[in-house]
Each structure stands twice: as structure tokens, then as C-alpha cells.
């Protein structure tokens, strides 16, 4: 009886340890909604592993958290720098998604040109057709999204420099805050990924830009040229659970989630 009790207790402890297996994921906000959906789909196949997706930490925050063991998987919107590689982490690109200008669905505008966007940021154009004030939502000067916007054209680079000095401009520190303000501020326009809009069910419209619709098909062919690259950051020797999760992402079930949420596989 004693031997049976010890065996039963050992089996129970082993079962609890297995049930407690976790994968902690965090990083750039644009990828979080998709990761939650991937985590849900993964857990249906692996009920013994819990996927925890944390609130937005940003790319740099995620890269710093992985080697410290605070995250098992970091989500980055850019490749690692040489200094970051020295931290003992590696990154792998898993998908790309269109980087879009978005407005609330109740806003009538459906398309703009890059030149018109530059005029909006610089303050040359301040009203939508119909008279409503345009409220562009800004991000930090050193943010990767801001960097990408400035690289779109010389006019955009100059316009964003002007916008950063304009008073009363809405400002967002995370992708989720940018989406919140684009949805909630009358006349607002924000910059975010198509994947964020789709994966989080946002009440936002991604605008056609220079005649090109920001779709997965147009992104994959280059017809729509503006995209966010999506990277997984892990330790050099990730845990068995992380390796299993990465394999799931590469499976047909994982790819279906990625494509459904506005990604293509490079």
C-alpha cells in the first residue's frame, strides 16, 4: 500500500510538472494578436503546454528579455544588431505583413497617395474631404515604424520631422495604443500592420496607397511595397517546448493562421 501511495504521488507530481510547462512570448505589439491565435491553435494539439502572450514590450525589450530568461520567445520587427547577437540569442524571420495607414471604418476615405500622407504629417493638409480635422497618430522618433516611414520617401522624412514639432499631435508608445487612438479619435489616421488589424478584429480600414491595395497577395509580389518583417528571437539552445512551437508555426496549421491574419511566408 505504501509503495502504491508513493508511486501514485510520484505520478501526480510528474503530471503536474508536465501540465505546468509554459512558453512565454512577448515583444513588438504588431505580432501579439497573431501569436495569441497561434498559441490557441498550438495548445489544442499540445494541451500540456501553456502559451502565455504578454502585453507589448517592443522589439528591443523582447531582445533583452530573452537571454535573461524572462521570455522564451521574443517577437521582433527587425534583424538583430551585432551587439544583440553577442547577448547569446538568435533570430529567424517567420513571416511578413503589410505596413499600412489605417483609419476608423466610419471614416469615408479609402485611398491616399504617399505625397498626400506627407502633406498630412507636415500640416499642409489638415482636413478630410467633408471638413473633419485630420489627426495623425505619431510614434517615437526612434521607433522602427517611424524609421520605416521616413524611408518611404524624402518628403515623408521631412514631413515626419515637422510633425514631431507640431503641438497637440496624438502620440502612441505601442502598436496597440496607436490602434486604439486610430479607432477612437475622430479624424485620426495611424500606422500599423495589417496583421494587427486582422488578428485583433480592429474596427479599422487599411488604406489603398498610391493605387495599391495592402493585401497579402500584393505584398508578396511587391506591388504593395511597404512591409514589416516578423522575427522570432530565442536563446541559442531553446527549450524543447519552444522548438515544438516553432515546428508548429511551420506546419500547415500554423501557416494557415499566419495567412489568415495578413502574413505571407518569405
Image (cartoon, rainbow, N blue to C red):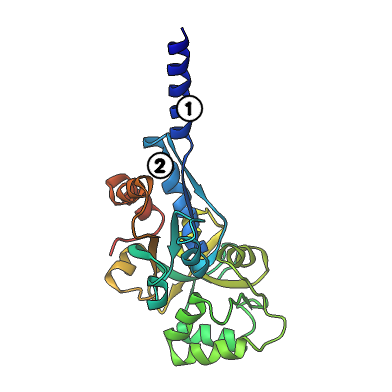
Taking depth in this image into account, of 78 and 4 the one nearest to the observer is 4
Q: Position of residue 159 (x, y in %)?
A: 55, 89
- The mark found on residue 232 in the picture is none
- Residue at the location (29% across, 61% down)? 265
Quarter of image, res 236? bottom left
Please say whether residue 79 is visible from this viewpoint: no
Q: Is residue 121 above or below residue 216?
A: below
Q: CA distance from mark 2 to mark 1?
A: 27 Å
Please say whether residue 58 is visible from this viewpoint: yes
Taking depth in this image into account, of 33 and 67 the one nearest to the observer is 67
Q: Position of residue 94 (x, y in %)?
A: 33, 60
Q: Comparing marks 2 and 1, which lies closer to the viewer?
A: 1
Give the position of the C terminus as an image quadrant.
Answer: bottom left
Taking depth in this image into account, of 3 and 174 the one nearest to the observer is 3
144 left or right of 246?
right
The residue that disc 1 covers is 13
The residue that disc 2 covers is 41
Taking depth in this image into account, of 212 and 82 the one nearest to the observer is 82
Q: Secondary structure at mark 2?
A: helix
- Residue at the location (45% across, 52% down)? 35
Q: Is residue 154 above or below residue 28?
A: below
Amino acid at each position: 500500500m505504501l509503495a502504491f501511495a508513493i508511486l501514485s504521488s510520484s505520478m501526480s507530481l510528474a503530471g503536474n510538472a508536465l501540465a505546468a510547462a509554459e512558453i512565454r512570448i512577448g515583444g513588438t505589439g504588431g505580432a501579439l494578436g497573431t501569436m495569441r491565435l497561434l498559441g490557441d491553435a498550438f495548445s489544442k494539439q499540445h494541451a500540456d503546454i501553456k502559451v502565455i502572450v504578454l502585453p507589448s514590450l517592443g522589439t528591443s525589450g523582447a531582445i533583452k528579455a530573452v537571454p535573461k530568461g524572462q521570455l522564451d520567445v521574443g517577437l521582433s520587427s527587425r534583424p538583430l544588431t551585432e551587439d544583440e547577437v553577442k547577448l547569446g540569442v538568435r533570430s529567424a524571420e517567420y513571416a511578413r505583413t503589410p505596413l499600412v495607414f489605417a483609419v476608423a471604418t466610419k471614416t469615408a476615405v479609402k485611398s491616399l497617395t504617399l505625397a498626400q500622407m506627407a502633406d498630412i504629417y507636415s500640416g499642409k493638409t489638415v482636413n478630410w474631404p467633408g471638413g473633419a480635422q485630420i489627426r495623425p497618430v505619431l510614434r517615437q522618433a526612434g521607433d522602427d515604424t517611424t524609421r520605416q516611414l521616413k524611408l518611404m520617401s524624402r518628403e515623408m522624412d521631412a514631413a515626419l520631422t515637422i510633425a514631431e514639432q507640431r503641438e497637440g499631435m496624438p502620440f502612441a508608445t505601442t502598436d496597440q495604443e496607436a490602434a486604439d487612438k486610430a479607432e477612437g479619435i475622430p479624424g485620426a489616421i495611424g500606422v500599423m500592420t495589417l496583421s494587427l488589424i486582422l488578428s485583433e478584429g480592429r474596427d479599422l480600414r487599411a488604406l489603398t496607397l498610391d493605387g495599391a491595395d495592402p493585401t497579402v497577395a500584393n505584398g508578396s509580389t511587391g506591388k504593395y511595397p511597404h512591409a514589416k518583417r516578423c522575427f522570432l528571437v530565442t536563446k541559442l539552445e531553446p527549450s524543447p517546448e519552444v522548438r515544438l512551437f516553432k515546428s508548429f508555426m511551420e506546419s500547415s496549421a500554423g501557416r494557415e493562421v499566419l495567412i489568415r491574419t495578413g502574413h505571407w511566408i518569405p
